[in-house]
Amino acid sequence: MVGAVQEGIVREMNGFDTNGYDKAAAAKQQQKGDHEEINKWFEEEINDDLKFCFALNSILHQGTSKFQEIALVDTKHFGKALIIDGKMQSSEVDEFIYHESLIHPPLLFHHNPKTVFIMGGGEGSAAREALRHRTVESVVMCDIDEEVVGFCRAYLSVNRDAFASDKLCLVINDARAELEKSREKFDVIVGDLADPVEGGPCYQLYTKSFYELVVKPKLHDRGIFVTQAGPAGVLTHKEVFSSIYNTLRHVFKHVKAYTAHVPSFADTWGWVMASDHPFTLTAQQIDERIKDRIHGELEYLSGDFLISSTTLNKSVRLSLLNETHVYTEDDARFVHGHGIDGALYLTETTGTRAEQ
C-alpha cells in the first residue's frame, strides 16, 4: 500500500498508468484491430472454489503498506471501488447502504449522542455520516494505517468535507492502544474494521476480552457500541457473524443484530449493536429522530426499514440463538482471505465490440 500522492502526478505501476491502461495489452489490442478489445476483471476470492468478478474500466492506484494491500479501481458496474487485501471494502454506487447501516442506528437509538469514537474507518465515510448528526460535537477516527487514510483523503473526494471538519479528530494508532490510554468516555463507539482475516491486522478487535476490558469501560452510561460483523447471508453467516453476536452477548445486557443486502459485496451484510440500555424505539420515533437530528436526506434507512432489518430469516436467527462460540485471541474465526499475502487478481477476456 502506498500513501497519499498529489493529484495530477503521472504514476506507473505494474504496467498501468494512472488512467489504468496496460500498455502491453493496449499494443496487443491494436495489433488485433479495432473490432476487438480486451476487458480487465478484478477477481475477489470468496472461497477456494468461488470467485466474484468485477469488470474494470481502469486501475486508478495500487500499492502495499506494512499492514495491508490497497487498490482503487474503476469498475464498470459499481464505479470507483476500494479494495483492501483483495476484499471489496466499498464502492461509490452503494457504499451508502453499508455506512448508513453502520452509523445511524446506534446514534439514533442513543438519547443524545455527542461524542463518537470510530475504530478504523480510514476511508472517511463513517465519519462523514456521524458528522451529519446535529447533536454530535466530536468524532475521533482512529485508524492504524496512515497510508490508507492518506490514500483515501487524496482520492475519495466525497469525504473531503468530513476530513476537513473541525469536529473530526484524526488519530493514526492502534485502536485498542488509543482507547486504553484515552481519559475520555464516548456515547457511541463504532467498529468500522476490516473483516477478521487470518494474517490481517483486525481480528483481535473482535474478541471478548477487547469488548469487555477496553470497549465497555470507555462507554458513557447508556452508551452504545456497534460493529460491522461480516457476511450474514444464509450460506455465510456462520463464518463470523454469529460468533461476534454471541461474543457481545457475553459482555452487554442488550445486543441487537441487523442486516442489509449490499450489492457490491454480493451478499447480505451484518452489524451488531450492544448496550446495557435496551433498544426500545418504534419506527415512528426513529423517523422523528431522523428528521430532527440529521442534516440532509438519508438514502437508505427509515424507521420502518431499521426495525425490519432486525428481523432475521429463520436460518440465521436460529444460528444466532444457538451459537456457542466466543471469539478469543486463541479461538478466533476468520472469513476467507489472504491478509497481506493476498494480491489484486486480474484476468483478461477478449471479444468483439459487437459481443459486448
Image (cartoon, rainbow, N blue to C red):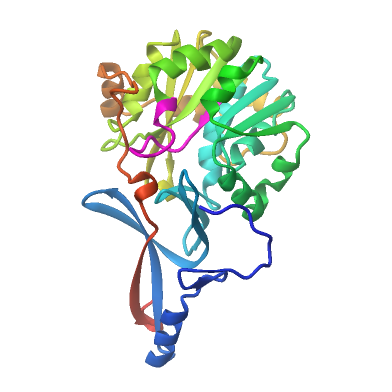
* Nearer the observer, 183 or 49: 183
Q: Is residue 61 above or below residue 177?
A: below
Measured as percent of width and height from the top left, residue 12 is found at 54, 70
Measured as percent of width and height from the top left, residue 343 is found at 37, 55
**Magenta-drawn stretch contains 198:** yes
Q: Is residue 125 above or below residue 80?
A: above
Residue located at (68% from left, 62% from top): 7
Measured as percent of width and height from the top left, residue 285 is found at 61, 19
**Magenta-drawn stretch contains 100:** no
Magenta segment, which residues?
189-205
Tell me where residue 250 sits by quadrant.
top left
Measured as percent of width and height from the top left, residue 225 is found at 52, 20
Tell me where residue 163 sits by quadrant.
top right
Q: In the picture provided, is 103 more to the left or to the right than 22?
A: right
For residue 109, say whether it is visible. Answer: no
Q: Is residue 191 above or below residue 261?
A: above
Q: In the picture provided, is 281 more to the left or to the right than 44?
A: right
Q: In the picture provided, is 177 more to the left or to the right than 242?
A: right
Tell me where residue 143 sits by quadrant.
top right
Residue located at (26% from left, 16% from top): 324
